[in-house]
Amino acid sequence: MERNNQVINSLHDLLDYDASNFIAAEAHLEQNMRGWIEKATSVQLKTVLHKYQEFIKQHEQKMNAFYEDEKIYSVSVDNQVMKAFISETNTKISNCQDPEILDACLLACVQSINHYKISAYGTAAAFAFLLEMDSHGKIFRQAEIEEKQIDDRLSQLAEHEINAKAKRPTILNG
């Protein structure tokens, strides 16, 4: 499937088109996640981001099976939405001078990315199940569930540690 010339005439075409963006999104995210983990100062945040990185790798592998079954030979190598999220994240964290603020910023940005992915995988699952592509629907639904698990972990971390520390950054306390 050539993305630039792809005609979308059915829900199945739309599913294939959207799914062809997933691998690029996951690849972009995985490349940047390594650097974000290094920049995070909270051990708990690093741990959650490492777990997220594992999910990202699993999602990439599972998407390859979908592409093979759907005979999608040309997937997007570029995901403009994910690139925008990543660019904004990198810009914001480069402006953070305090480690606690950086952790809060990074967590919030990753959670925004996570919410985008929950929506994307959830929509793909709904389309796949409607099209009676249950095995693929299960793959998308599992990815959505894993994204929600990360979201829950990030929310707990934000509420019980990261945001409280960012409320009183060390630069202001010093």
Image (cartoon, helix red, strand yellow):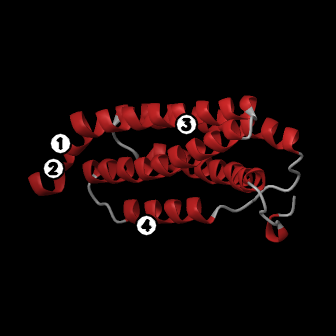
In the visual, does 71 lie left or right of 118?
A: right
Crowd tier of the residue under label 1, counting other residues whose Cα lies within 10 Å: few below 14, some 14–19, many 20 or above? some
Residue position marked by numbered label 4 in the rendering: 91
Q: Residue 100 placed where, x, y %?
A: 26, 48
Residue 57 position within the rendered picture, expressed as x and y whole percent measured from the top left = 66, 36
Q: What amino acid is labelled 3 in the image?
A: Glu
Amino acid type of the residue tagged 1 in the rendering: Ala
- Considering only order in the chain, which callout, 2 or 4, is on the residue closer to the N terminus? 4
User: In front: 124, or 104?
Assistant: 124
Query: What is the tally of numbered marks visible in this picture?
Result: 4
149 displayed left or right of 70: left
Q: Earlier in the sequence, mark 3 or mark 1?
A: 3
Q: Could you say where residue 131 lies in the image, as x and y percent from the top left?
A: 73, 40
Can you give x and y, in whole percent of width and height, for residue 56 in the image?
61, 39
> What whole-number distance in Å separates the C-alpha atoms at marks 4 and 2?
21 Å
Label 2: element kind: helix
> CA separation, marks 3 and 1?
29 Å
Q: List the residue tagged with mark 1.
A: 164
SS of the residue under disc 1? helix
| Residue that numbered label 2 is attached to | 167
Of the two numbered discs 2 and 3 on the same chain, state the one appearing first in sequence: 3
Dot 3 surroundings within 10 Å: few (below 14), some, or many (20 or more)?
Answer: many
